[in-house]
Image (cartoon, rainbow, N blue to C red):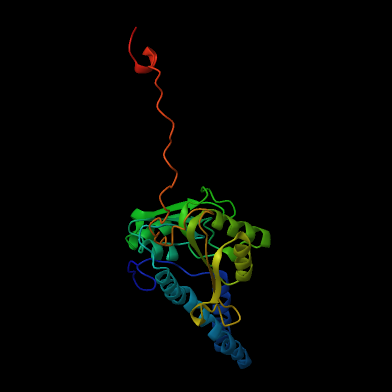
Amino acid sequence: MVGAAGAGGQGRYGVDAPGWLLGLGGSVVLPLVAVAAGAPRWLLRIPAVTAAPAGLFLHASVRGKFLVWEELLDGLRLRGDEQVLDLGCGRGAVLTAVARRVPGGRVTGVDLWRSVDQSGNHAATTLDNAGRERVADRIDLVTADMRRLPFEDGRFDLVVSSMALHNITDARGRSEAVREAYRVLRPGGRLLLVDIFHTGQYRDLLLTAGARDVTLADVGHRMWWSGPWVPTRWVRAEKPGVPGEPDPTETPPSVPPSSTPPSSTPPSSTPPSSTPPSSTETGGTA
């Protein structure tokens, strides 16, 4: 595994779901301003309730998710030469974290660059962050829909996604995105999806597709988006090798020397022919 920088690195990654954060922050600040201006003091009960959820949301967005992803990526023990795909890469928080670990590989980020999902979400911002993290030489960005990826089958060693798939609002669309992620994964490759909703659906789809070692788990309080009622979970899976061929992720067992006994067939007893060969058989001329 190749070492990585600490949480957040040198990039500028904005905040997730800025509309939600603005709403939570407003529920804290506005009542305080109103009471200061002479409004009834019972309004102070509102920030007393919403301050903690707002703080947890902000922490998850600007620090918690970075800490979680550092641990998840460390757990993959990457060789350093993998081809990696990041679905919904946004401003590149996970994209650059992976790129630091694959100095001999490449990381491709796919996004539609919508600022409603992440503040300041533009390809130019992602490239700037890649430069700040000194990994721009191994990053490619593609504008594409996760449901219709413009890549051939089996292209990538690893596919990751952070807080992106749930932005596809219909179950059919999410199913298409998960199937596409699995399609572009090479045999023996791995998939790691982190999200707040629908992770059970992702797990079931991968099991149906034939993935192995499919695991679903909670990442813990560092990615509570306002509280334990909005937790974050990860789904990890591996694509089996091609049937009939050795799995590229496993060391083949040693093969013992052949113990086949020598043939006991007796030599032919047919006497040699006494007929002289023709000139065509000897290659001579008449």
* 60 to 237, vertically: above or below: below
Taking the spot 51% from the left edge, 82% from the top edge, the residue there is 221
- Residue 251 relative to residue 194: left or right: left
Taking the spot 38% from the left edge, 61% from the top edge, the residue there is 99
* 68 to 116, vertically: above or below: below
Question: Outermost residue, bottom direction?
Answer: 41
Question: Outermost residue, top direction?
Answer: 286
Across and down, in percent, residue 194 comes to: 53, 69
Image-quadrant location for residue 49: bottom right
Which quadrant holds the C terminus? top left
Image-quadrant location for residue 117: bottom right
Across and down, in percent, residue 108 comes to: 44, 55
Q: Nearer the viewer, residue 258 or 261?
A: 261
Across and down, in percent, residue 265 comes to: 45, 44
Q: Nearer the viewer, residue 36 or 255?
A: 255
Q: Nearer the viewer, residue 148 or 123?
A: 148
Q: Nearer the viewer, residue 34 or 245?
A: 245
- Residue 140 relative to residue 206: left or right: left
Residue 57 in view of the camera = yes
Which quadrant holds the N terminus? bottom left
The number of numbered badges drawn on the structure is 0
Across and down, in percent, residue 157 comes to: 45, 57
Image-quadrant location for residue 258: bottom left
Residue 170 in view of the camera = no
